[in-house]
Structure formats: structure tokens, C-alpha cells
Image (cartoon, grey):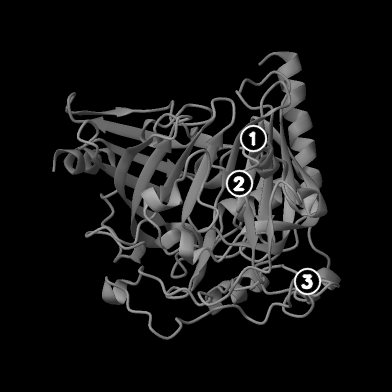
Amino acid sequence: MHYSKHLMVLAAGALFAGQILAAPTAEEVKQLGTTLTPTGAEKAGNKDGTIPSWEGGLCSPPAGYKPKMGAAGGGPYVDPFASEKPLFRITAANLSQYADKVDAGTKELFKRYPDTYAMNVYQTHRTSCHPKWVYENTLKRIMNPKLVGNAPGITGAHAQIPFPIPKTGYEVMWNMILRWEPVTFRFGLDAGLMDSSGTLTRASYQVADTQNLYWDNSLTSLPEDKPYRSLLSRSKEPASQAGLAQLRSAFLRQDLHEDMAWSYVPGQRRVRRAPEFTYDTVSTTSGGLLIFDEIAGFDGRMDKYDFKLIGKKEMYLPYNAYKMLAGTLEETMSKNHENPELMRWELHRVWMVEGTLKQGERHIQQKKIFMIDEDSWTAPVYYALDHSGKVHHMMHLPEIQEYDKPGPKTVSFILYDLSRGIYGFQTKPQGRPDQYGIITMDKFPPSYFTPDSLAGSGVR
């Protein structure tokens, strides 16, 4: 190892050793379940009364909920706020009145499309609710999780929000990466691409199976050399992609293990390792728009960026977006931007995290900025700057409360490539004949998320 590189490793170790020492104090821990919610959000509302207090969230289905998949749950979801009207509407003409609560990426949409882009702002509902055992585990195991290595990886965490009282940007990012989800579930993913002329192209339709053993409460921990999360997706449409299959697995100890990926291409009839499925490689199933480390806001290792915790701020977020979820691609995707009449915006408190590309690292994006909801630990808004300081990509990731589980979930994303003037939309559809949102599944056999299984799934 070169001496300079050795010094960098030692410095990184010292950095994360400092983070390990920044554990919650006994007084801070006492706040969980009192002044803080069980997952670490401020329980009280804001001074203006525009953000209410958290009263437990939306933990059971409203009247009229009848999922097509029966006990497996999923859509179509009943919108519990369907009768509500917007409190006000933000347009390019009055944006200055609300500018401190609108992110820089979304402001670019107002700047580029002043005549058509708008934000309908509704009453805020803090609907986030998790299973009771998530709250219990988070409190009982609060001192266990630690950041390790220079990626960094995480150790000591299982079936909990790892850092409900975060002290660093990396801790907030791990809370987002390890946000709650069912242990095993299946979902469809419908993707469309809108070009600058207003022409909509259906980019792909996939069905994906996911296993997240981190949230298996029957276990107490996972071996460090075993993936905590695996996803196997199969492309159904268009015909040129039918039969294409991908397998991706992620590890908690990212300092020791890189994410693993394989692909199956029907024309080649073979499975191959796909180490390129990471960082700023473009995902072909998104229509050539999404890069891999932007999946769900952020995906993969954090070793290329320094993640700084900016603090907490009140921001407008795409939230409780049941109306958006119910729309088809054609209804949702208008020329230049998402259909403003289907998007619901609410005021919420977020953790602001800024990722800055490390010196010597290569990536098409110089900075990544995340707005991470304090209640759900999802990232409803994210944008990135290129090396000239301009907004390159910006993403809206509207969420709903899946009251059938219960748990908060990002159910779609709208990604804008502002350097090319195009955007894409991917959603977990409710109206496909074979898929209705996210449905829970029985446990998959041990051999399911393996390259051999990938080959079999691609042939079918």
C-alpha cells in the first residue's frame, strides 16, 4: 500500500472512531417516546401550527379498502384525504413567498416552465406508522449500531431504526437506506420516459421480488458476509427487453463487501456478473435516465462522497400521494413535468444531508443533496449538481403510508435530467392485471436469490 493511501485509511478510521464515540446520551435516549417519536422525529408540531404533532400515524386501513390481492395487501389504496382541497397553490408568480421551503431542484422546474409548473400544497398529515416491534427494537437496541470502516459499513444493527438520534450525515443516510419495509414482497414497476418534445415512451415494465433480512424480526442478527437485502427483477415489456433479468444484493458491512449484481440476457442465454451496476452507471430499464446510485434516492456504497449533516428544516414534500399512485403513466406524465394536479405537497420537517464528491474520486455528479423525512426516514426529494454547479438530476419520490402493513413507503419516483430537458417516471402500479402495488409474500427458498435462480427466471 502506498504511504499516502495508508494515511488516508488511517484518517478515515479516525473519523469513524469519532463517530462511534458520538453515541446518544442517557438524557437523549429518554426523549424517545416522550418529546421524540419512537423513531426519533420531533413529536410536537411547529410553532406556526402548519405541522401538527405526531399522534401515532395511520396504522390501519380506512373504510372501503379492498385490496385486489386479498390478504397479501397492496392496492388499490383508498385515499384517506381524497375530499381535501389545496390550502394554496405555488406558481412561478408567487414562488418568492415560499422560496425558503422549496428545494433548489424544484425551483428549476418553476424557472424552466413558469406557465405550467405548480405545487398544490395541502394540510399536513403525519401518517407515518411502523409495527410496534420496530419501536421496541429501536429503543432496546439503541446503543448497538456502529459505523465502521471508510465506506462506511454498519454493525450491531438489526430490525430497528439504527440511529434515531443521528449525529452525522452518514448516520442519517443509513437510516434512509435501512428504512422499514416488509421482509419479503413483490411489486411491479412501470416506467415511462418523456422527451423534450412531449413524446411519451413506455421504457419498461418489470416485476421484482425482494427479500430484506435486516427487517426479519425472527432473527437477532445476520452474518456479516451474507447480503441483508436481495432483489430479483424480470423485465416483461417492451418486447426488446422481455426475459431480461437482474439480481442485486447489498451488504451491511459495505466497508468489507461491495454490492453484488448479475444479469441474464435472453439472447446470450447466460448469467454474467455485472459489477458495473453501481455508482453513475446508467440503468437501461429506466430509458437511459437513472444512474444506479440514485435508485430510491440513494443506493450502494457511500465511499465516493463525504456526507455532511446540514441540519433540520421545514420543506414542502410530495407526501400522502395516493392520487399520484392511482394515476396511469399517461395521466401522470404531462409535457415537461409531472401533472401538478395529481401531486400532493405537504410541509414536513426533514434532515438535510449534503454529499460532496471526495478529492480524487470520479462521478458525473459533484454534489448530492437529500431531504430525508424525520417521520419515515424516506427521501421524498433529492437533487444533484454537476461539476459546473448546475442542477443535473432532481427527483421527487412521493410516499404514502401503506396502512395495510403498516409502514411508510416510497411508491414512485419522477426523475428530471435537466441537462437534457427530459424526465422519467417509475411507479408501482395499482391497475396492472398481475400487480397491485406492493404485496407481501411468503419467504423465498434459500436458493431463490442466486445466479442459478436468475437464469431460470429469465428463461420462463
- Looking at the rendered image, the disc whose residue lies closer to the viewer, 3 or 2, is 2
- Residue at 46%, 28% (x, y): give it: 282
- Image quadrant holding the N terminus, namely top right
Residue 119 or 273: which is nearer the viewer?
A: 119
Tell me if label 3 and label 2 are in contact, CB under 8 Å. Answer: no
Q: The residue under label 1 is which amino acid type? A: Arg
Q: Amino acid at mark 3?
A: Val
Q: Is residue 355 visible?
A: yes
CA gap, disc 3 and disc 2: 43 Å
Tag 1 secondary structure: helix
Q: Nearer the viewer, mark 3 or mark 1?
A: 1
* Label 3 crowd bin: few (<14), some (14–19), many (20+), radius 10 Å: some
Q: Which residue is mark 3?
A: 29
Who's the residue at 30% across and 44% down the image?
205
User: Would you identify the image quadrant in which residue 328 lies?
Assistant: bottom left
Of the residues under marks 3 and 1, which one precedes in the sequence? 3
Q: Say which label, 3 or 2, has the lower sequence index.
A: 3
The amino acid beneath tag 2 is Tyr
Q: Which residue is mark 1?
A: 112
Residue 212: percent from the left, percent from the top? Answer: 43, 56
Q: Residue at x 66, y 25 (%)?
A: 386
